Amino acid sequence: MSDPTVEPGAPADGATNLPSASEKSVAAEAKRRVPKLAQLAATPDRIILRLNKLLAAPGGLSAFLSTFNYTLYLLAWLEAKSTPLKIRIYQLLNNTTVVTVVDNGPSHIAALGSLLSSTRTTLRLFGLLPMYAWFRQLMQGPKPGQDRILYATSVTQCCLYISFQFLENVAFLTDHNVLPRSYTTRWTQASGGKTAKIYLWSYRSWMGGVLCDIVRLFREAQLERARRSQRTTTDVSTMEEDKATDEKWWSQMVVPLSWLPVAIQFSKEGGIPGFNLGIMGLCGAMAGLGRTAELWAKTAE
């Protein structure tokens, strides 16, 4: 005889411990079986949000595009040099000595690098605005207690960078027919109307600005040594502070030293013998990597 207390359609006593529908869901089961699945799924989301913060930070877009651009140059060079390796791998996998025809058409990586380079040049058209603000600030004179050599170096560097940006803008706008070519005939007629001469002097100004960074850093090191020599005692906290200062100095010195070969290459007619896309990509990537890594670390805050 059946239990009269059990209503039609209601579960029997043996089924009262069944889990709820939410507990039996696929998402809950996956989360229970694979605890890190949700974290892995959220990783791309976090990366995209951090990348957005990096690009929105002051100087973030410029630093990211520069590092990415020169990394592409390095990859394009490695791709071009990998043809013998591709042939050898094909021969090993197919157990043959036949030399296959490898597609040596235009590199898509190099094309993207060229596009980014043009994009960065376009964005630099507005670079004279912050340089004017910097120059205007410098014209107010050195700050109280500022070293005279450092101040003179900053003024020189600012003038050189303004010259670089102005000449690059003129050449770039002339190449794209925004400025009439008659404006630059005096400098382009010797090269058949090409703006190579304008770019050459633009890059020479840029190289001067890079050298100013090296002068500034050496002067700062000289002043720091003089300051440390006047100490009477040194404790643990002071040593840690000095270590942090030294690390910061070296990280800053890497930037102009990395840019210098690139600057010389573009500032010298004919360039540096043996200089190639791979060297340029490596130098540029090293120069921008520190700044990009610093900005990326701040996005986690």
Image (cartoon, rainbow, N blue to C red):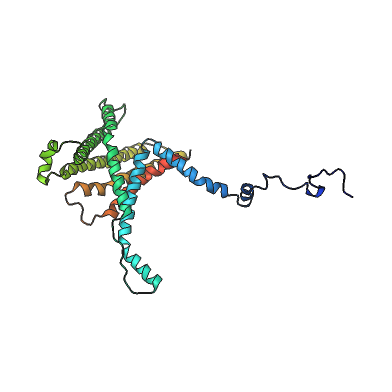
Query: Which residue corresponds to the image point at 22% horizontal and 37% vertical from the top-left?
Result: 169
Q: Is residue 249 visible?
A: no
- For the residue pair 260 and 173, the one nearer the viewer reads as 173
Kindly indicate the quadrant of the structure image that contains residue 66.
top left
Task: Tell me where residue 271 appears, x and y as whole percent.
Answer: 20, 51
- For the residue pair 299 and 142, the one nearer the viewer reads as 299
Task: Tell me where residue 205 appears, x and y as whole percent.
Answer: 21, 40
Question: Above or below — where is 131 with respect to 76?
Answer: above
- For the residue pair 100 and 88, the one nearer the viewer reads as 100
Q: Is residue 178 visible?
A: yes
Kindly indicate the quadrant of the structure image that contains residue 94.
bottom left
Hey, which residue is sitting farthest top in the picture? 140
Compared across the picture, whether 76 is left or right of 171 comes to: right
The count of marks equals 0
Question: Above or below — where is 165 with respect to 98?
Answer: above
Query: Which residue corresponds to the image point at 30% horizontal and 59% vertical from the top-left?
Result: 80
Hey, which residue is sitting farthest front in the picture? 8
- For the residue pair 27 and 154, the one nearer the viewer reads as 27
Task: Tell me where residue 267 appears, x and y as whole percent.
Answer: 20, 46
Hey, which residue is sitting farthest right in the picture? 1
